[in-house]
Image (cartoon, rainbow, N blue to C red):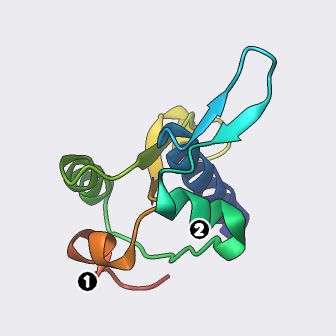
Amino acid sequence: MRTGKYCAQAAHASMKAFLDSGAVTVGEDGRFSVDISNPDAVAWIGGIFTKIATYVESEAELLALAEQAKAAGLPVGLVQDNGLTEFKGVPTYTALGIGPASAEALAPITGKLPLF
């Protein structure tokens, strides 16, 4: 992928994981609220916004990481690109956001991955 595409896919994954975590809800009036019983979400939305960018060598590895994170009960944002600008029209999984979660919860899943 081009560098800009990597950045966009990572941003999608980060937001998807956060929004799908249940830490944020949208009321009927369209207003967002944050579940303050989730300390990782509160810390993240409160301005820490910690992100670590790592990589894998294959789509299969990416999907396996997503399953590991789900099994550990962590929020997961798996992004599948439509393939319109790259990947020759083939929908392709491109990025995975995990969290918000503590470093201790993430380490068994992502701790050995190479940094981007």
According to the image, label 2 marks what residue?
43
Disc number placed over residue 63 in the picture, else none = none
Q: Element under label 2?
A: helix
Query: Which residue type does callout 1 highlight?
Result: Lys
Q: Is residue 79 left or right of residue 71?
A: right
Residue density around tag 1, few if under 14, some if 14–19, many if 20 or more, within 10 Å? few
Q: Is residue 11 left or right of residue 13?
A: right
Residue density around tag 2, few if under 14, some if 14–19, many if 20 or more, within 10 Å? some
Q: Is residue 93 left or right of residue 68?
A: right
Residue found at x 59% / y 60%: 42
Q: Element under label 1?
A: loop
Q: Quadrant of residue 6?
A: bottom right
The residue lying furthest to the front in this view is 37
- Picture layout, residue 31 above or below residue 36: above
Q: Quadrant of residue 98?
A: bottom left
Of tags 1 and 2, which is closer to the observer? 2
Residue found at x 74% / y 35%: 32
Which quadrant does the N terminus fall into? Answer: bottom right
Q: Quadrant of residue 72?
A: bottom left
**In this rendering, does residue 24 appear at all?**
yes
Residue found at x 32% / y 71%: 106
Q: Is residue 97 left or right of residue 61?
A: right
Between 114 and 19, which is closer to the camera in this rendering?
Answer: 19
Please tell me how many numbered marks the rendered image carries. 2
Marks 1/2: CA–CA distance: 24 Å
According to the image, label 1 marks what residue?
112
- Picture layout, residue 82 above or below residue 99: above
Q: Give the percent coordinates (x, y) of residue 85.
A: 68, 43
Query: Which residue type does callout 2 highlight?
Result: Ala
In primary-sequence order, the first of circles 1 and 2 is 2
Between 46 and 21, which is closer to the camera in this rendering?
Answer: 46
Residue found at x 44% / y 76%: 54
